[in-house]
Amino acid sequence: MIVFRDPAEVPADFGRTVAAIGKFDGVHSGHRAVFERARQDAARIGAKTVAVTFDRNPLSVLRPDRCPDDLVSVQRKIELLSECGLDAVLVLTFDERLAARTAEDFVASILVDALHVATVLVGRDFRFGRGGSGTPALLAEQGARYGFTVDEIEDVFLEGTDRRASSSWVRELLAAGDVTLAGAVLARPASVRGEVVHGLKRGRELGFPTANLPALLDEMVPADGVYAGRLVDHTTGIAHPAAISVGTNPTFDDVPQRQVEAHAIDRPGLDLYGHDVTVEFWHRLRGMTAFDSMQALIDGIASDVVQARALLGVPDPADSHAE
């Protein structure tokens, strides 16, 4: 997938495009339905598919007091978009200058002149241009003028629920620690990515070494607690089943910031320092607990690992030895 950071970077001979426009924070199942429709539209007319998105949430400029935390970083968003089978993504810098552009100018200069759109895909609540004056109806009017069509995508509802897939719902679920339902809305496991750093090495002392991510991540981390999931090592390409802790370690009360620690099950000697990893959250085991003794903590972690094994389908080596 080609990444453009400015409309001027799109080659003049790039060809006709089908463009989907949105923030696409988290690239959830609703977004993926839009991209699937874009691929279908593009295949019919022999065009390329492009996602038009922004380098930050527009609310961070327009209404910073109302701007929610990002689910994923811009770089992670680009990576997720690349998995959706798109030909290109145009990442627009959302600053005061872009916010001041009229909807008509946005259409003419970006969609028509730069991308040569044949079809534009948007959600029903999509707004763009100065003051949010751009609507799907205005896009349709501009399409009649410039020769493109507008495909207004219906909301996607998760099976068995009455809520549409949305980034705000994913935020609610992560804040509540419901990573299983969040993963269903996302159509992928809830996750965070970062480089493994040195911690206090307390897990190793307790017999459960962990890979620690930096305390400050630019992705939304689930609620404090213990989870079962995977530790994906991008340096080696190996995914390890894991028991994961999120929080400040209340038993010792000496960790000032929330951190993500992942224990790779059955890999006690694993050295991941400096490795680029993704921690995937599949199931929530429990909330964060302050234990009243070191032995109680060790027993608690051991119980967490047993539960994680069961949920992840990881056999216990001790069972095979017993046979």
Image (tube, rainbow, N blue to C red):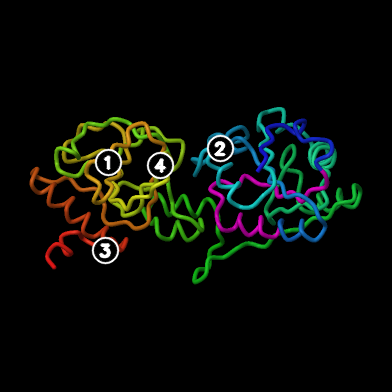
**What residue is at 84 percent from the left and 42 percent from the top?**
112
Q: Which range of residues does the magenta coloring cover?
A: 15-37
What amino acid is labelled 1 in the image?
A: Leu
Residue 74's disc number = 2
Give the alpha-carbon distance from disc 2 to disc 1, as whole Å: 30 Å
What amino acid is labelled 2 in the image?
A: Val
Residue 236's disc number = 4
Residue 15 sits in quarter: top right
Q: Residues within 10 Å of mark 2 (few under 14, many from 20)?
A: many
**What residue is at 90 percent from the left and 47 percent from the top?**
146
Residue at the extreme right: 145
Residue 290 percent coordinates (x, y)? 17, 45
92 lies above or below 34: above
Check disc 1 and report its element: helix, strand or loop: loop
Whichever of callouts 3 and 1 sits on the residue coming sooner in the sequence is: 1
Can you identify the residue that label 1 sits on? 270
Residue 185 percent coordinates (x, y)? 50, 59
Whichever of callouts 2 and 3 sits on the residue coming sooner in the sequence is: 2
